[in-house]
Image (cartoon, grey):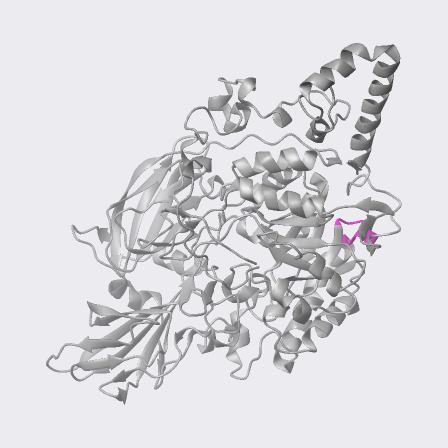
Amino acid sequence: MIDGRTPAQSGTRDWSRLPRRDTGQSPGGTGPALPPFALGASAAANDNRAKVPPSLQWEAPVLVTAPPMVARVGVPGNGAGAAPGRLQSMWSCGGRRRRRLFAGAFLLVLAIVVLSRFNWSGLVPMRLRGRIHGLQARNSKFLLEGKEFRIFGGSMHYFRIPREYWKDRLIKMKACGLNTLTTYVPWNLHEEVRGKFDFRGNLDLRAFLRTAEEVGLWVILRPGPYICSEWDLGGLPSWLLQDPEMQLRTTYKGFTEAVDDYFDRLMREVVHLQYKNGGPIIAIQVENEYGSYAEDPDYMMYIKQALLKRKIVELLMTSDNKDGLAAGFVSGALATVNFQKMDPGILSYLDTMQDNMPKMVMEYWTGWFDSWGGPHNVFDADEMMANIEKAIKAGASINLYMFHGGTNFGFMNGALHFDEYKATITSYDYDAVLTESGDYTSKFFKLRELFTGLADMPRPLPPIILNKASYGAILMQQYISLWEVLPSLVEPLKSEHPINMENLPVNNGNGQAFGYILYETVIPGGGELQSHDHVRDRAQVFLNTLHIGYLDYVKHQLSIPDGQGYRQLRLLVENRGRVNYGRNLNNQRKGLIGDIYLNKTALRNFKIYSLDMKPSFIESLRGTTPWSAVPDSAMGPAFFRGTLQVQHMPQDTFLKLEGWSKGVVFVNGQNLGRYWKIGPQGTLYLPATWLQQGHNEIIIFEERAAGRIIQSTDLPFLGRSQFPRLDL
């Protein structure tokens, strides 16, 4: 969903405008930033309605009142329009007839304002019966069942949110005044092993869409096959890269055959959920941002036809930034645009693609994502509102990307690689309308006031915010070195040459998708180790068990100290995330992708260990012996184990790994994701739904220098903030 540019430093800013979410304070530092009823039971007792935004002071249903724009027509008593003296004279001396005329004029203006609101009270999924016409694009407007309709949407991804929280987040979307959900579909999760599809549990797409329908939201489905989304390989499965000739996102036969098989299965989940079949899906997106890739002029037509052949009957759309609109367009689909800054002419540019069609912003970027080693990007709420209001006043429909970002749990984050490789962090908070843990922000309240003033639609009360817990310090009590556990955990593969992850003969022939991979060989002496840029993405280098340095995209050479006899050279390589955007997609094989040289001689005869750290891997580790007490100066690579005690009903919390270097955290077998001391992210989100009363096992895989404790806190820390500047 990006333009490929790196946010630049924006200089000095007025930080007082930012909501201090972590402290619960308003921008000025006094009073709660959120209404007391939204803060949970502990804060509800201190309810003070004077502090609640007017749009959130609930009462019984009332008649529609005029929005604030009435204050601009010069109505007596509101301080707007005519000069004070003239206004007073007109009111006091005009007589009964003048007062009647003025009152009539006021009621006329009020009626115009009220009638200008969209009345969509009947256009709700569960209420709409007798459907004939789906979403149509006619005469520069959207029509739904023949009535003028504007899409006020928000993006939320089921695969980034625990299933137990889907409904809570969707109700919050509806309560914000939105009427449409947009979601991507990640191919690499649904078909992790070629030919075996998974739509269960947290991947139950049908249940997610039905929940949106139940809440009262329409759906725009974005099935890809490529989704970008700061997701590993843009959602494409890594086993595609086993083919050395693979050309992703083209009509290359090896790719289209895989897409056809995937679409055959995926469409069975969603076809019956289309509008004309009584479901919530009103539109389907054809691929995603192809204009920035555009390697094959026949590709978009192939994807369009692949959808139509599988009984997709609703309105088709494409999505690109301004520069990609022309190359990403396909006839028979509505072109939509993505941006963050509402530059003059950006919407009218759509008219050059398709005359007299409705305008839509498929992705209005409410924030931005973060990369390891960079700042935490935030986007000012008032600036966001100004751009959204401009788009709506220009007659456009709009979708907020993201409304709620969630988390890149496990190893699923993507990366960018233009001038340099930059991996996306675990958190996908995105500075979105809801936080990573689903809490309200100032953006939510500003948007709710805007959207609820534009349309008459049934909307629920915003759910209260779930309390967060601070469980205190958690002592890591047990330890086992990777070198100790390796022989009992993984059977090595033997190969004369190094083999990349995707081509390892594991996982039923599908290769290794994620995690770490260890290469071992024997060397006779010391010298210069040269990677020739064949390390993907970062390798720790060991002599026997002695750590001597690392190799990555920047560092290609390392000195190996001399020594007597033969020694083991070990390279522990981490896949930090495959590129999700740009023209490097075909070059995303991980591990060692070619030869490694010592003194200009290619190394041979490797033992290769697949360390994917899947649930089965962690389960095997759990029963491994011998775990021992943590030494005073524990060093990785090693596993550490401790227990989080929860006495009452579990609550969401955040794990702070101060004193630890780099690694991964597992709680009750669930992979929370990566941590790294270079930041910006300083905590990992732990949902309550993954905890249980009593004992909760925490296992940490630490690559280098370990701490002794981790801290459970009720506040997230996502790093120092910076305003990104995105000019597209």
**Residue 387: image location, x then y, percent:** 61, 46
Q: Residue at x 31, y 45 (%)?
A: 642
Q: Is residue 259 visible?
A: yes
Q: Residue at x 67, y 57 (%)?
A: 345
Residue 279 colored magenta?
A: yes
**Residue 124: image location, x then y, percent:** 77, 40
Nearer to me, 362 or 625: 362
**Magenta-tinted stretch:** 273-280
**Residue 661: image location, x then y, percent:** 28, 55
Residue 315 sits above or below residue 458 on the image: below
**Residue 570: image location, x then y, percent:** 26, 73
Give the side of residue 728 with respect to residue 93, left or right. Answer: left
Give the side of residue 340 with respect to residue 331, left or right. Answer: left
Residue 219 sits above or below residue 1 on the image: above
The quadrant of the picture occupied by the N terminus is: bottom right
Nearer to me, 556 or 96: 96
Nearer to me, 614 or 266: 266
The quadrant of the picture occupied by the C terminus is: bottom right
Nearer to me, 151 or 129: 151
Q: Residue at x 31, y 58 (%)?
A: 624
Image quadrant where residue 403 sits: top right
Residue 506 colored magenta?
A: no
Residue 627 sits above or below residue 228 on the image: above
Give the side of residue 359 with respect to residue 412, left or right. Answer: right
Q: Residue at x 11, y 79 (%)?
A: 563
